[in-house]
Amino acid sequence: MLEAMRLYLFENQLLPILLVLMFGGAVLGGRAWGLYLKRRVSGGKIRPDEISVSAIFGLISLLVTFTFFGAYDRYDQRRTYLVDEYNTISTAYQSIDLLPVARQPQLREDFRDLMDRRMSLYKKIDDKKVFSQRHKDFEDALARVWKDAVAAVEATPYPKNLVAAQLLTAISNMNDALEKRRMALKQHPPPVIYTLLLVMLIIGAFIAGYNQATTDSHDWTLVPVYVFLSVAIFYITVNLEHPLLGLITLDDYLVEIQDLRQTM
């Protein structure tokens, strides 16, 4: 249920709106609580504990830094895996030239089928059943490439088969790169980290509203700025963590793989 809701928020770009409502509500809640306390002390002044406030915002800063740069590092790692994937596929396809001419057409067709399945594999991954079937078809195509490559190398006469065997090494490297790319999609911090970040940002918004009420300040300039920055930081961090679902994508790198398919 929670997974379906998360995907729905991502697909419809509703997460920023939800965050604005949450942080805005926290600000209003903090202000209401501050005004309530002021009324209880019969108009007396209430001074927030500056040490506690500083400690809380220090923790928020630490957690924001930790989660943002962690998400960016994983995003950058996925880009590196895509480059490796492109290079290894290109090398493996070119290595088909090491086989006898009669053995090349079938393997080239296997590669074209593999690339077609690869390009459709990560589209609309929100449907787990569809993605599971696509992944199974992709694994079957990968196994077919390996099987036909082994058969082609074994059918190559000595000593040319010693050179043709380099194709198997290239395909093995390609398989490793494809698997790293797939496993990278599963590399995320525990959900409790993002839950904690969200809770801490809400607490910060609550304190901002509380401070407005208890200090008799009529300048609300910094409050919406805090809300905007909190929404932007959380939203961008989550998008970096899920580049296949949000606004931040890897499309520039995927285009290169599509261009590679066109050359086959």
Image (cartoon, rainbow, N blue to C red):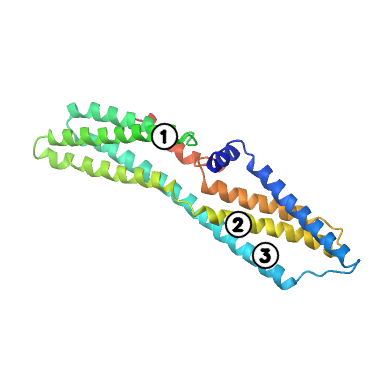
Q: Secondary structure at mark 3?
A: helix
Residue type at numbered disc 1: Leu
- Mark 3 residue type: Phe
Q: Residue 14 vs residue 28: left or right?
A: left
Sequence-first tag of 2 and 1: 1
Determine the residue located farthest toward the bottom in the rendered image: 51
Query: Between residues 227 and 3, which one lies in front from this camera angle?
Result: 3
Q: Between marks 3 and 2, how big is the CA–CA gap?
A: 12 Å
Picture disc at residue 197: 2
- The part of the image, by quadrant, that contains residue 219 is bottom right
Report, in whole angstroms, how far the alpha carbon at label 1 lies from the one at label 3: 42 Å
Contact, CB < 8 Å: mark 3 with mark 2?
no
Residue 117 x, y percent position in the rendering: 37, 31
Instruction: Identify the residue under disc 3.
Output: 57
State which mark lies toward you, 2 or 1: 2
Front-most of residues 73 and 124 = 124
Tell me the residue that label 1 is attached to.
Answer: 121
